[in-house]
Image: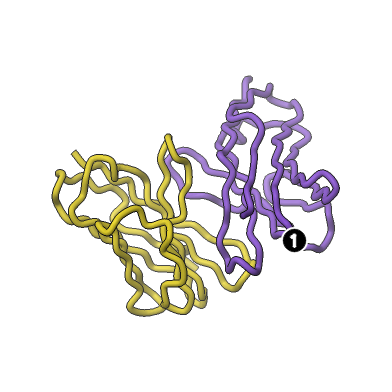
Amino acid sequence: DAGVIQSPRHEVTEMGQEVTLRCKPISGHDYLFWYRQTMMRGLELLIYFNNNVPIDDSGMPEDRFSAKMPNASFSTLKIQPSEPRDSAVYFCASSFQQGYEQYFGPGTRLTVT
Amino acid sequence: AQSVTQLGSHVSVSEGALVLLRCNYSSSVPPYLFWYVQYPNQGLQLLLKYTSAATLVKGINGFEAEFKKSETSFHLTKPSAHMSDAAEYFCAVSRAAAGNKLTFGGGTRVLVKP
């Protein structure tokens, strides 16, 4: 298996622009997670899905952030409009079942200028 | 709410010396526990996990961790550090009742000196 795939790996954009991050989970995994990692705040869970349904989005920082999972093999995290404080590494992870380990993608490094 | 505390944000060890990374958790019920490693510019990789089977868990790259319920600890060890062990290590906890959500510790960055 190719593991969790994320694109793009790097994104540089200007403040106010829309940013879309993409994730393909491992085939057969029922859970998908979006995290954000910064030096100041460490790893933060933004949202997670079970069987394509959002279960907990309490970590989404603002209404500027939205996430979708239209099918079992694809998810997006969108920021509109982006701000410099959104600069971070965003990770997608997937998991087989409850209690099982999560497998992380390589991350998308987002820089908002 | 569950939480994870990693003692020491930075640890420096000599090559060949023991690596000991400390992790304590707070949970009202027995949790699942994990250690992940993150190499520079990479995602997190699972080192090992505890899911209520044997209390001494062996993982990849020679690492192991021991679950001690009485101490609510899950410390990570490796008998002999290698230069390639330089990375950041994260302890994480989850509970079945909380779905598959992981709560991460703040991470410990390991520096290995030759």
Please tell me the colour of chain A.
yellow
* Chain drawn in purple: B
How far across and how far down the image is residue A66, in percent?
29, 63
- Label 1: few (<14), some or many (≥20) within 10 Å? few
Q: Position of residue B69 (x, y in %)?
A: 82, 51
A98 above or below B91? below
Task: Point out residue B28 in the picture as x, y percentages from the top left corner.
Answer: 73, 57
**Image height check: is B29 above or below B14?**
below
Relative to B15, residue B3 above or below: below
Residue at left 55%, top 37%? B88
Position of B68 with respect to A38 (left or right) is right
Amino acid type of the residue tagged 1 in the rendering: Val
Residue in the foreground of this view, choosing between B42 and A32: A32
Could you tell me which secondary element the residue under label 1 belongs to? loop
Q: Nearer the viewer, residue B85 or A84?
A: A84
Q: Which residue is mark 1?
A: B29
Q: Quadrant of residue B19?
A: top right
Q: Residue sitting at 46 percent across and 38 percent down?
A: B40
Asked where in the image residue B23 lies, by quadrant, the reply is: top right
Residue at 59% from the left image edge and 40% from the top image edge: B89
